[in-house]
Image (cartoon, helix red, strand yellow):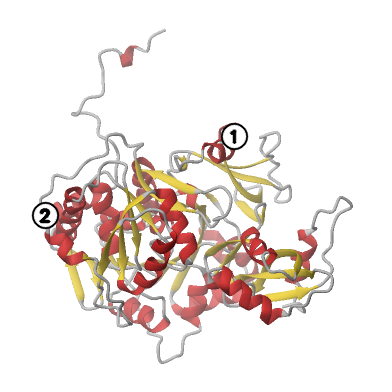
Amino acid sequence: MTNPYNTDLDRTPANYQPLTPLTFLERAANVFPDHTAIVHGALRRSYAEFYARSRRLASALTKNGIRRGDTVSALLPNTPAMLECHYGVPMCGAVLHSINTRLDAAIIAFQLDHAMAKIVIVDSEFMPLLQEALSLAQVAPLVIQVDDPEYDGPRTEVEVADYEVFLTRGNPDFDWLMPEDEWDAISINYTSGTTGDPKGVVSHHRGAYLLAQGNALTTSMKKHAVYLWTLPMFHCNGWCFPWTLSAIVGTHVCLRQVRAEPIWSALAEEEVTHLCGAPIVMSLLIGAPDAAKRDLSHTVQFFTAAAPPPESVLAAMKEAGFDVTHLYGLTETYGPAVVNDWHRDWSDLPADQQATLKARQGVRYLPLEGLDVLDPDTMQPVPRDGQTMGEVMFRGNVVMKGYFRNPTATQKAFEGGWFHSGDLGVRHPDGYIQLKDRSKDIIISGGENISSIEVEEALYRHPAVGTAAVVAMPHDKWGETPCAFVELKPGQQADSETLRAWCRSQLAPYKVPGRFVFTEIPRTSTGKIQKFVLREQARQPEFT
């Protein structure tokens, strides 16, 4: 039977427009043109200026041949230019590729080639890194350099386009492009895996629109909230907060580097209300010298992901004026899509019980339609007993389009109508989920994902290494750090410093193991390495 409510009631421009977070900035600039949108050192930039510069960028990119579906890469710290890229690039129909500034040149070259980058916008600090990457890449994109006045380090003199000059070629009243379909790509972000299958996560306008609003609802951000950029914007597009802040007409406070003194100064002087970061940022704040700390006149909302912070850190953060909330998500879910929603009566519980509750990842964000822990073989939910493990799976509008140019990986990730996270967890009787292990052995160090396989492959390239197994080892500062168990080949010799130097030549610095253990590696009867045994060993207090 035909649905009568679908008869003669069609989509038209009057009643349907594609969802896109770009409209948030347009509205903010029209309604609150003089409100401060961006703070960066001495710089104060209004929403009218922010919108005009973003339109200039879109216009200039268009004049340089950028069309719908082209990739524009950004190798930038948390600066105003990075915020402008989050609007100006998709405003001309292009797709923003934010590059992790901590990666090595070979990995960046791989990403540029795989994403087919047409233009790269780079901060002057990272120009040498980009030059090395381009010497290894197949693509030859136009390079535009941002000379940030807050950067006081060495500069490499190269003949490339200047960002500010480039903007002058654009029209501040540019009639920017709405997506043809809200399913159109808005960004591509690469997961930590860089060998084997390329994993370029494609996000769409609809998902970015929904998660940006979901952030505001989940974090209780009021109109004109002030957000401090300690979370890198290259991480899942800053968890969509570059778009969230325009929705609530808030203020971005930019920071080039995450250091204790400027963070405390910004918290007090700019009256910051919200910030996000890995547990290491909390340790940085509470471990700062007393001279750097500032008294806060208000409670600051701090949102963290990765490994849950220990009870002592939570207590110290509360005493310092922060309310900490645990989030969880992946690049494939636009950043956090799960929140440890706190119940008021939990605050009356003893501190150790509160810490236990805060260690859980939580429940789904409002814009996420489905979150469950399923048996990956039967695709049935595991019992809600807090003990039976299964795979955490997601379903909804804030799940990626898929992996760019990798249909096999996309199909595998979406088997059974759910996105398979690869994370193993349990579900408690109240519905809250808690991670217990990572099926892909990802190590989260200072908020950065490290593939144990990638580190192992680097070790295997050393001529003295016969077998290598890398697991997570607890670390007071970084939360986790790689620990490498190594069996040397017969007749070969190598010590920790030799392998550490080797890894430094093969990997980004944060991926280098913090400890090397030369031992016989435990195996099953079929020869498979028993990583669970190594993980338990690495977690023992006497080991660390």
Which picture quadrant has residue 101? bottom left
Q: Compare residues 369 and 121 and report the one nearer the observer.
A: 121
Q: Is residue 96 visible?
A: yes
| Coordinates of residue 61 in the picture (x, y in percent) | 21, 52
Decide: few, some or many residues near mark 1? Use Cα within 10 Å; few <14, some 14-19, many ≥20. few
What residue sits right under mark 1 in the picture?
415
- Left or right, 497 with reference to 142: right
Q: Residue at x 62, y 48 (%)?
A: 422
* 398 lies above or below 518: above
Looking at the rendered structure, the kind of residue marked 2 is Pro
Q: Residue at x 32, y 42 (%)?
A: 69
What residue sits right under mark 2 in the picture?
172
Looking at the rendered structure, the kind of residue marked 1 is Glu
Task: Assign a secondary structure to mark 2.
Answer: loop
Q: Residue at x 73, y 64 (%)?
A: 468
Q: Residue at x 24, y 77 (%)?
A: 149
Quadrant location of the C terminus in the rendered image: bottom right
| Coordinates of residue 381 in the picture (x, y in percent) | 66, 38
- Left or right, 255 with reference to 385: left
